[in-house]
């Protein structure tokens, strides 16, 4: 009988100097077993057969003491010699069929796959589980060909659970591998719908069964502690992962005007901190926008103070506008600090499609942590989609546009234009934008806002088009960036209000009376409320008699942002008014 295996914390060993150092592998694995790894794979690509068998035998003895299965990488002969529970085969190793013939039906056979086709073949040949990857580049694996990210892994999981897939595909166990550690494991499992139970949720995707870890345990100076930390992170990831703000809930439909007004009242009442790691161009404007909407801004690019700031229940904006290699390490510290306490984090990948350095920076940041909201103009969101391995829609053919094919483009298909600076190109049809934003949101399990004359907002379930705003916004630099600040303030307020009693407030006002109303302000509601505050204020400012152009628009806009908040707080701007002003569908 094949043993029932718990794949949730799958340890893969590495005996190389860079990872294991001069420590004894058996003792490191024993500590990992004490910490709670649920399955062990002995992976050693260099030792001679005699050494492999000796170490495998010793590892098997230890694993048996903890009733944990031992799998041998590649070497079916070694697995046979020691009589352990199974083998793991790479694409260049013996085929699953041959291994099954040699080992028989009772042994566990796993296969590495990095595409839907490889997964299909491994299932057909009778593999028990799939090692899907590489998720992220690591020091030991930098080959970008195999790096498939969250979207590539999800594509494989989706194919396995497709209605037309075989029963074996639906039942097969799966683990993800590549660059997984304590800072990212919850986000990865969340984005891959980890479930210790086999019922798929949502039904379109088969949940991942576990995560394979190499250096986060083997290279750790305290493998027992590293393993037990990972184990507890896996366990809590099924209830509420730490990085999710407390008000996170997938909203089913268009939020009501009253909920949106409540979001503004909550912002006024909580006066939240908005921590901006933003570009040099917009520092001052962003701080002034924050003050006028009713938030408390701090502009800080020093990642070492992020933990202290994250404890103040604010939100973080990471804006790549003028970032440097050094800035990226500071962003990482800050994102980790906010993720650790469930503080909302907004990513604004400014100019992400313009240069190789920005493309790399975006890929780095997407691997660092969870973003509650990712906002950007069309070019920037297209680059987020590329970085997330999501197919790019075909742009509107334009005889006047000089399209620059991207490296991945097929010769026949026009590709969206290369972003020239921080400004956006406008090449997609509205339906393509809707579909892209929705797919991106559901793949990354976050909220995406694509700005432009019509903004598109989606949490993967509800997708909205927002037609408010004024063309002056497009003629003032950094309005997209300051919209990011505005969103952060609304998210922080909604998260703080949902986790504390609505009675504790620094400002007196007619705030939302019932705690339930506050609880209804999820991420989508807060994001929509912030966009409407920003854009209706822009419309009001542009209509002011003193405004003659983009220059005089800026001070009037700050005034209008404050006037909007005051109007809502004083009850002059109510439900009917907002219903008449919002152009959302
Ligand atoms: N023509 C327009 N009509 C109405 N609103 C607009 C128009 N152009 C931009 N906006 C609004 O301006 C804000 C910023 O969006 P935009 O797409 O210009 O951001 P961005 O390119 O990231 O800006 P920046 O890089 O200058 O910060 C959004 O609220 C958007 O709705
Ligand atoms: C102009 C500009 N350059 C880098 S950031 C920025 C502000 C608008 O995004």
Image (spheres, rainbow, N blue to C red):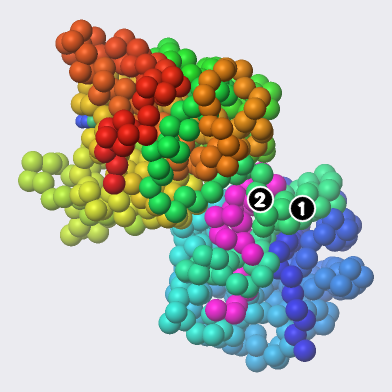
How crowded is the residue under tag 2: few (<14 C-alpha within 10 Å), some, or many (20+)? some
Identify the mark at residue 232; answer none if there is no mark.
Answer: 1
**Closer mark to the observer between disc 1 and disc 2:** 2
Magenta segment includes 154: no
Camera-side residue of 320 and 307: 307
Magenta stretch? 170-195
From the top left corner, tell me how far across and down residue 34 is, in percent. 88, 58
> Is residue 274 shown to the viewer in this render?
no
Res. 152 visible in picture: yes
Q: Percent from the top left, x then y, of residue 79?
A: 76, 79
CA gap between label 1 and label 2 equals 12 Å
Would residue 321 appear left or right of 29 to someone viewing this image?
A: left
**Which quarter of the picture shows residue 383?**
top left
Q: Is residue 312 above or below residue 381?
A: above
Q: Nearer the viewer, residue 509 or 342?
A: 509
Nearer the observer, 475 or 264: 264
Q: Position of residue 144 (x, y in %)?
A: 48, 53
Other-residue count near label 1 (Cα within 10 Å), few / some / many at <14 / 14–19 / ≥20 = few
Residue under label 2, please give it: 240
Q: Indicate yes or no whether the magenta region holds residue 173.
A: yes
Left or right placement of residue 137 versus residue 290 in this view: right
Circle 1 — which element?
A: helix
For marks 1 and 2, the one nearer the N-term is 1
Q: Residue at x 31, y 22 (%)?
A: 537
- Residue 566, quarter of picture: top left
Marks 1 and 2 in Cβ contact (< 8 Å): no
Is residue 25 or residue 119 the one in the foreground? 119
Residue 558 lies, with reference to residue 422, above or below; the image says: above
């Amino acid at each position: 009988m094949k043993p029932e295996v718990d794949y949730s914390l799958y340890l893969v060993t590495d005996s190389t100097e860079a990872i294991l150092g001069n420590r004894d592998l058996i003792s490191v694995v024993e500590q990992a077993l004490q910490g709670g790894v649920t399955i062990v794979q002995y992976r050693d690509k260099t030792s001679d057969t005699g050494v492999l068998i000796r170490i495998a035998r010793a590892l098997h003895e230890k694993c048996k003491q903890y009733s944990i299965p031992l799998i041998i990488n590649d070497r079916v002969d070694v697995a046979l010699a020691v009589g352990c529970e199974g083998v793991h085969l790479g694409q260049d190793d013996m085929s699953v069929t041959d291994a099954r013939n040699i080992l028989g039906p009772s042994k566990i056979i796993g296969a590495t796959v990095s595409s839907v086709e490889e997964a299909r073949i491994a299932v057909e040949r009778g593999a028990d589980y799939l090692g899907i990857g590489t998720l992220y580049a690591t020091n030991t694996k930098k080959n970008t060909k195999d790096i498939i990210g969250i979207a590539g892994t999800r594509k494989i999981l989706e194919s396995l659970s497709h209605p037309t897939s075989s029963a074996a595909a639906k039942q097969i166990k799966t683990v993800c591998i590549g660059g997984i550690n304590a800072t990212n494991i919850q986000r990865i499992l969340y984005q891959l719908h980890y479930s210790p139970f086999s019922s798929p949720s949502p039904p379109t995707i088969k949940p991942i069964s576990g995560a394979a870890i190499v250096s986060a345990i083997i290279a750790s100076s305290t493998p027992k502690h590293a393993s037990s930390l990972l184990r507890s992170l896996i366990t809590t990831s099924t209830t509420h992962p730490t990085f999710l703000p407390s008000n996170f809930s997938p909203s089913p439909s268009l939020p009501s005007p009253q909920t949106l007004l409540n979001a503004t009242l909550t912002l006024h009442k909580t006066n939240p901190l908005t921590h901006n790691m933003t570009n040099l161009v917009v520092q001052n404007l962003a701080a002034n926008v924050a003050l006028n909407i009713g938030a408390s801004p701090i502009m800080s690019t020093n990642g070492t103070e992020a933990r202290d700031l994250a404890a103040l229940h604010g939100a973080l904006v990471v804006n790549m506008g003028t970032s440097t290699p050094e800035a990226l390490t500071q962003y990482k510290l800050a994102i980790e600090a906010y993720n650790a306490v469930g503080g909302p984090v907004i990513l604004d990948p400014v100019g992400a499609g313009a240069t190789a350095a920005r493309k790399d920076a975006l890929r780095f940041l997407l691997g660092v942590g969870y973003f509650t909201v990712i906002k950007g103009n069309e070019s920037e969101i297209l680059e987020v989609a590329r970085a997330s391995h999501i197919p790019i829609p075909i742009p509107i053919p334009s005889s006047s546009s000089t399209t620059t094919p991207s490296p991945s483009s097929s010769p026949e298909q026009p590709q969206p234009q290369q972003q020239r600076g921080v400004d956006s190109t406008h090449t997609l049809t509205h339906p393509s934008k809707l579909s892209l934003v929705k797919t991106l949101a559901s793949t990354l399990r976050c909220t995406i806002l694509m700005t432009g004359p019509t903004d598109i907002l989606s949490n993967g379930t509800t997708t909205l088009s927002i037609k408010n705003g004024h063309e002056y916004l497009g003629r003032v630099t950094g309005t997209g960036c300051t919209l990011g600040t505005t969103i952060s303030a609304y998210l922080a307020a909604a998260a703080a209000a949902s986790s504390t009693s609505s009675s504790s407030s620094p400002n007196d006002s007619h705030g939302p009376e019932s705690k339930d109303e506050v609880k209804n302000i999820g991420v989508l509601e807060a994001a929509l409320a912030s966009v409407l505050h920003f854009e209706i204020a822009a419309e009001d400012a542009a209509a002011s008699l003193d405004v003659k152009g983009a220059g005089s628009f800026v001070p009037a806009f700050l005034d209008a942002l404050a006037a909007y908040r005051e109007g809502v707080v004083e009850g002059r701007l109510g439900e009917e008014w907002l219903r008449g002003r919002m152009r959302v569908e």
